[in-house]
Image (cartoon, rainbow, N blue to C red):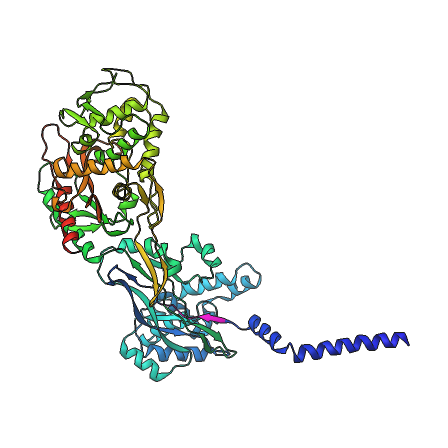
């Protein structure tokens, strides 16, 4: 009896469970089944977010391209697909493809079975030939005459048919982009089975090539990055940012594609509407940008008219806001052909190429002297020359008389900086002395320089930023060179961060192009321009450096680089460089590069500027024509900024 009761109890439990699952859990399990058995496909593309300047002018937009797609229907026959291809070929013009023609020829000629000999079939049955071998033999034996036997419509049908059968059966197949309005209308009227027309999206650059390299490129996911993108639920045929801003802000710029459910008959039902990506609002001002490019090109052409400018071909400049680190405009212009005055933009060199920059680093050198107690406010010396043991004599560009920390900057005394370098070694200068230097002496300079961003990553929102070259050798001669910007190399972007840090009295911020991210009227993200570090000096020293730079632009070597009306501050730099003129790997020619960094007004800075002209003239002692291109560029752009603010 107990046995029967147990059986009845188990049966009752199972029956109750079945009833519960069928009545109460049915919808839940049906949904789970659908999720496991129903395929979903995404639309072809979604418009990326736009790139817009600080004043709302659209720099990079999207344009819709009328595009034809094919979706394979359930249980469709070969004959039906050939008919679809023929109908489509009668409406659109499509470039021919020889492989497609051969595939079509085989499909329409008994799969090319008569192109294989009985002996070859016997080898195939004996597994001495593979199916791939047979396919290869068939393709090889299709003659030009065979292909020419196809009509023009058949040839177009061949290409279309081949495209219709690439990839997975449930995926939409791209047939042709950029069809005409007439073709588009005809396709809608014909309503060909399985054929749809959609808008796909491509980038439009409203200002031509201006900043195009900074915006970056888009394209299919690179092979080496596919795993990373697959983890983020991308498809391998998705279009993504490949470089610079497009890559840096891919997560914001990418749109959401339409989502379709694949029905049992392989038709599609839209289940989710796609949407455009977020817009990037940049700190750039396109009007300032265009003026900066014009001024650079004009002054490069004018400079090339001077003597000894054989190897001069490019100049760089960045302008921005020192209070935030915002970049308002940036440009590198390279003269490709002096005869035709053809230029190319080399904007990415601003972060990827470094240069010796000369005396513009002297505020960082003074900072090192202040920090380690080698000098103080008002410390003075009589300018002269340094002669170390077995080292050629080193001097300022001329005898400057008595100089202190202010006039050492404004009049650009090398001698003053050399004494700081000697003081870091805990020695005092004596004629023909042996200067014992250590790696730590170099590091004292470099640590302070890095606080300003020199020889350090700036954090600019562009990939591929380089650190510059840090010299690996240590010697007394090189320590002196380091103090005047003649040893380590720095990028123009590092100079921009450096001058901004000086202008903001010691607050170092990352230079940035992105101001905010916006979706319609909603702000998705906004830059608050955080401080990376503050220079490890008392504020009195930082104010002293600004005062010295102000003196340089009002009565010193930087006079005239920014109009006195704007109450400027700045510092010039001249450096000796060497170049390889015949690509044999040997630096055979000495040239001179010049630079300028500045800001205005010096007591409440609104704008900062960096200008660099590498290899401006060939260094021939007592026989060169100085070219003041950096002064002309700086003055023109700062005037434009203040007059159009």
Considering the image in quadrants, where does the N terminus appear?
bottom right
Coordinates of residue 617 in the picture (x, y in percent) = 14, 36
Coordinates of residue 220 in the picture (x, y in percent) = 38, 59
Foreground of the two, 237 or 333: 333
Coordinates of residue 351 in the picture (x, y in percent) = 29, 45
Q: Is residue 58 above or below residue 427?
A: below
- In the displayed structure, does residue 120 sit left or right of residue 364? right
Coordinates of residue 565 in the picture (x, y in percent) = 12, 46
- In the displayed structure, does residue 58 sit left or right of residue 129? left
Q: Quadrant of residue 475 in the image?
A: top left
Count every numbered label the image shows and give the total: 0
The residue at 34%/26% (across/down) is 441
The residue at 41%/67% (across/down) is 256
Q: Quadrant of residue 356 in the image?
A: top left
Q: Is residue 481 above or below residue 136?
A: above
**Which residue in the rendered view is the most extreme toward the bottom?**
189
Whether residue 608 appears in magenta in the rendering, the answer is no
Q: Is residue 489 above or below residue 415?
A: below
Regarding residue 441, the answer to whether it shows in the image is yes
Q: Is residue 488 above or below residue 47?
A: above
Q: Which residues are magenta?
A: 40-46
**Which residue in the rendered view is the most extreme toward the right?**
1
Considering the image in quadrants, where does the C terminus appear?
bottom left
- In the displayed structure, does residue 577 sit left or right of residue 560? right
The residue at 34%/57% (across/down) is 246
Q: Quadrant of residue 403 in the image?
A: top left
Foreground of the two, 54 or 28: 54
């Amino acid at each position: 009896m107990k046995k029967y009761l147990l059986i009845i109890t188990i049966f009752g439990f199972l029956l109750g469970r079945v009833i519960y699952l069928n009545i109460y859990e049915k919808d839940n399990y049906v949904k789970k089944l659908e999720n496991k058995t129903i395929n979903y496909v995404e639309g072809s593309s979604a418009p990326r977010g736009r790139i817009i300047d600080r004043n709302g002018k659209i720099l990079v937009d999207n344009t819709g391209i009328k595009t034809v797609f094919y979706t394979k229907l359930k249980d469709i026959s070969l004959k039906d697909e050939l008919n679809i291809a023929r109908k489509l070929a009668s409406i659109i013009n499509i470039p021919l493809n020889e492989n497609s023609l051969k595939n079509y020829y085989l499909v329409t000629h008994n799969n090319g079975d008569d192109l294989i000999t009985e002996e070859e079939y016997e080898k195939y049955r004996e597994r001495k030939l593979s199916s791939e071998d047979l396919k290869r033999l068939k393709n090889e034996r299709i003659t030009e005459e065979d292909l020419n036997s196809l009509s023009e419509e058949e040839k177009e049908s061949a290409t279309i048919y081949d495209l219709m059968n690439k990839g997975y059966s449930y995926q939409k197949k791209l047939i042709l982009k950029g069809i005409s309005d007439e073709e588009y209308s005809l396709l809608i009227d014909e309503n060909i089975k399985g054929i749809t027309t959609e808008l796909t999206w491509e980038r439009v650059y409203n200002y031509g090539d201006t900043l195009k390299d900074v915006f970056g490129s888009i394209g299919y996911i690179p092979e080496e990055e596919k795993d990373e993108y697959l983890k983020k639920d991308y498809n391998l045929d998705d279009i993504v940012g490949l470089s610079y801003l497009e890559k840096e802000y891919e997560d914001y710029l990418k749109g959401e594609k339409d989502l379709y459910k694949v029905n049992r008959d392989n038709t599609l039902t839209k289940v989710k509407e796609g949407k455009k990506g977020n817009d990037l609002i940049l700190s750039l001002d396109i009007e300032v940008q265009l003026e900066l490019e014009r001024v650079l090109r004009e002054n490069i052409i004018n400079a090339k008219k001077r003597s000894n400018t054989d190897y001069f071909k490019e100049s760089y400049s960045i302008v921005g806001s020192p209070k935030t680190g915002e970049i308002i405009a940036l440009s590198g212009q390279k003269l490709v052909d002096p005869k035709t005055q053809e230029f190319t933009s080399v904007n990415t060199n601003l972060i990827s190429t470094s240069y010796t920059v000369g005396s513009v680093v002297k505020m960082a050198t003074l900072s090192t002297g202040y920090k380690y107690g080698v000098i103080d406010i008002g410390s003075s010396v009589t300018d002269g020359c340094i002669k170390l043991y077995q080292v050629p004599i080193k001097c300022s560009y001329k005898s400057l008389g008595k100089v202190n920390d202010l006039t050492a900057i404004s009049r650009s005394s090398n001698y003053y900086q050399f004494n700081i370098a000697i003081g870091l070694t805990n020695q005092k200068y004596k004629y023909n002395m042996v200067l014992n230097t250590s790696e730590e002496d170099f590091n004292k300079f470099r640590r302070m320089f890095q606080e300003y961003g020199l020889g350090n990553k700036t954090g600019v929102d562009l990939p591929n930023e380089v650190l510059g070259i840090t010299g690996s050798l240590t010697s007394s001669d090189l320590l002196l060179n380091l103090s005047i910007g003649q040893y380590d190399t720095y990028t123009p972007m590092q100079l921009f961060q450096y001058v901004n840090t000086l202008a903001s009295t010691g607050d170092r911020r990352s230079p940035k192009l992105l101001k905010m991210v916006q979706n319609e009227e909603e702000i998705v993200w906004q830059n608050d321009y955080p401080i990376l570090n503050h220079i490890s000096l008392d504020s009195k020293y930082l104010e002293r450096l600004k005062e010295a730079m102000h003196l340089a632009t009002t009565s010193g070597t930087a006079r005239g680089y920014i109009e006195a009306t704007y109450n400027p501050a700045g510092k010039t730099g001249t450096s000796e460089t060497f170049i390889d003129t015949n690509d044999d790997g040997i630096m055979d020619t000495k040239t001179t590069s010049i630079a300028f960094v500045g800001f205005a007004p010096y007591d409440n800075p609104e704008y900062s500027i960096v200008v660099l002209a590498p290899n401006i003239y060939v260094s021939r002692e007592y026989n060169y024509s100085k070219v003041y291109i950096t002064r002309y560029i700086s003055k023109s752009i700062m005037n434009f900024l203040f007059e159009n603010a």
